[in-house]
Amino acid sequence: MYQTTRNVAISLLAAFTQAQQLSKPALQPSVDYLNQGLVNNLSPTHSTWDIWGPGYIAQGCKDMTQRAGLNPADVETYNVHYDDCSTAWVICRHKSVTEPLINLIDLFGRLPVHTRQYVRHLIHLPTPSSGGYAYNWNGNVAVHSRVTGDIMWAFIHEAGHSLDLLGAYPDKPLSSSANWINNYNQDPNVPDSYAQTSQVENVAQNTVVDTYNLVVPNGFAGVEPGWQNIFHQFATVQTAQRNAGNLLVPGGTCTSRLTNSAPVLQSSMKRWLQGRALGPPPNVALPHDMKVIPGKEFNTKDICKIHW
């Protein structure tokens, strides 16, 4: 009983640390000034894609569509086959979004494959009147926004949540570890105003910074005079990703994947009637030799969501 109570207490303390507002001043208003360098130096990955037959949608996409108050019957589902992975990603897109599907496929494919493999599904939903935003729910990323090259940094941010909260790094999760807090305490700033939201968001923004540092010539110091003010934070992400197999470095092929969510019916009609009309659901099973990334429940929308 003592051990169980102690574990609960530790979990609650970690959750409090992750969600607590940070007091350090922001180095810049936003990390979006890093965006063009990221787009210029993260190459797109060649891909092909095919659309699912009518009537089916991935459960993860259906859940996020319904959370937005939208109808899953208005969502198209695709298998996107990138050349750097032996199995496709299931990507969803609401019919009312105006940007072409290739924009979504292009930006997602620019993520280093060992980062991308920690995203299960990507879904593009309409932009609300309050402005664009994205969030990550259990490794499923919803983008409620125009999808253009201007938000490459946001794709890295959301994938950064997966790396942190799904346990890709030796510290699981990094954002509530003593290692992270000790290095955070050595810096006078955080990257931007959004990083002040919590340690979870701070790690995700430092993931953007560190990706820039790794892939852009001259690194973060080449564009940010005050780079030393957050050095211990982005260097901690850099060490963590290196110890986990250079997750933020482009190149290679996928080595593991999250299990796809099940194909389900888009509508609420009885299964037997839909099944007769639509035939069997798509096969979304991973290859038998693909290592499976263990899933974990989290939802960054409950903490905060990144807006632009």
Image (cartoon, rainbow, N blue to C red):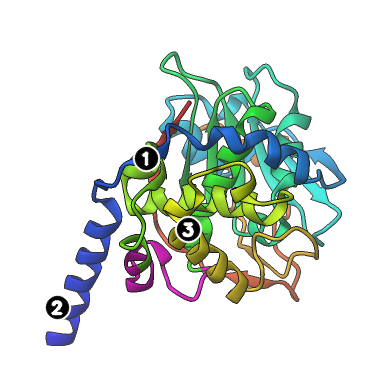
Q: Can residue 288 be spotted in the picture?
A: yes
Would you name the residue on which mark 1 appears? 26
Measured in 3D between alpha carbons, the distance from the residue under mark 1 to the one under mark 2, in whole angstroms, is 37 Å
Would you name the residue on which mark 3 appears? 231
> Badge 2: few (under 14), some or many (20 or more) residues near its Cα, within 10 Å?
few
For the residue marked with disc 2, what is the amino acid?
Answer: Thr
Q: Earlier in the sequence, mark 2 or mark 3?
A: 2
Per the rendered image, the range of residues in magenta is 168-182
- Helix, strand or loop under label 1: strand
For the residue marked with disc 3, what is the amino acid?
Answer: Phe
The reply, left or right, for residue 187 in relation to residue 14 is: right
Would you name the residue on which mark 2 appears? 5
Q: What x and y, as percent, mark residue 50?
A: 82, 40
Where the N terminus falls, by quadrant?
bottom left
For the residue marked with disc 1, what is the amino acid?
Answer: Ala
Q: Is residue 111 above or below residue 117?
A: above
Q: What x and y, as percent, mark residue 289?
A: 75, 76
Q: What x and y, as percent, mark residue 295?
A: 49, 64
